[in-house]
Image: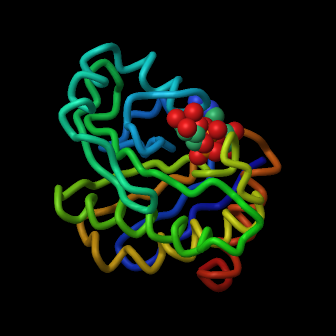
Amino acid sequence: MTVPTRRIGGAELDVIVADITTLGVDAIVNAANTSLLGGGGVDGAIHRAAGPDLVAECRMLHGCKTGDAKITKGYRLKAAHVIHAVGPVWNGGTRGEDDLLASCYRRSMELCGKHGLTSVAFPAISTGIFRFPADRAADIAVRTTIEGLSAAPSLARVVFCCFSEPSARLHAEAIEQHSGPCA
Ligand code: AR6
């Protein structure tokens, strides 16, 4: 699937299907849990690829609340940094899940701005082990990231790094919906 790049302000938005641990961007975002000490899914893959120094730095952060994000170095990854964002577990949608998911994208964008990062890649946070509906999550991810560009003027590239074609299609549709027609 080829998705045309969209430009919003000074940033381009891309959707790709890839293993996020292979990307040479300033920061990859991790779909972490509140302990920040690793787990399965993309979290496990990032810790394996980064090596043991990552969990050592994470230990010093003393966890992270759901809806928040914290930044570390990338160690053996190509990415210089990892932004550990904690998405909500899906519980039917009545426990603030939408707001918590939006919050972790917003906090990640704020960290990109604070650290002057020029490129960032997001996985589809909460849509795996945490069971958040993929279409609803893609809409929140794209909308909140576009809103967050104003907090991160240094960003020239935002990548939605999906792990399947259907996930990529959902993100591409959301970009189309929230960014207007292709220029
Ligand atoms: N690259 C890109 N995307 C990936 C990769 C990868 N290497 N591996 C999985 N995905 P998940 P969650 C996709 O389960 O739902 C962990 O145990 C995956 O297909 O990794 O937020 C944490 O420690 C899905 O679309 O994260 C937490 O306890 C998306 O990444 C919990 O899982 C997120 O799936 C977090 O669950």
Residue 120 percent coordinates (x, y): 39, 51
Q: Quadrant of the C terminus?
A: bottom right
| Location of residue 52 by image quarter | top left
Count the marks.
0
Query: Residue 136 vs residue 82: left or right?
Result: right
Residue 87 percent coordinates (x, y): 53, 55
Decide which of 95, 109 is in the foreground and name it.
Answer: 95
**Vertical position of residue 24 compared to residue 109: above or below:** above
Query: Residue 91 vs residue 125: left or right?
Result: right
**Vertical position of residue 128 compared to residue 151: above or below:** above
Residue extending farthest bottom: 180
Decide which of 155, 134 is in the foreground and name it.
Answer: 134
**Identity of the residue drawn at 50% across and 74% down:** 144
Colour scheme employed for the rendering of this structure: rainbow
Query: Residue 34 vs residue 74: left or right?
Result: right
Ligand 1 located in image quadrant: top right
| Location of residue 129 by image quarter | top right
**Identity of the residue drawn at 69% across and 50% down:** 127
**Vertical position of residue 120 compared to residue 33: above or below:** below
**Identity of the residue drawn at 24% across and 18% down:** 53
Decide which of 70, 13 is in the foreground and name it.
Answer: 70
**Identity of the residue drawn at 36% across and 41% down:** 25
Residue 19 visible in the displayed image: no
Residue 71 visible in the displayed image: yes
**Vertical position of residue 32 compared to residue 183: above or below:** above
Decide which of 62, 155 is in the foreground and name it.
Answer: 62
Residue 131 percent coordinates (x, y): 73, 50
Residue 5 percent coordinates (x, y): 58, 62
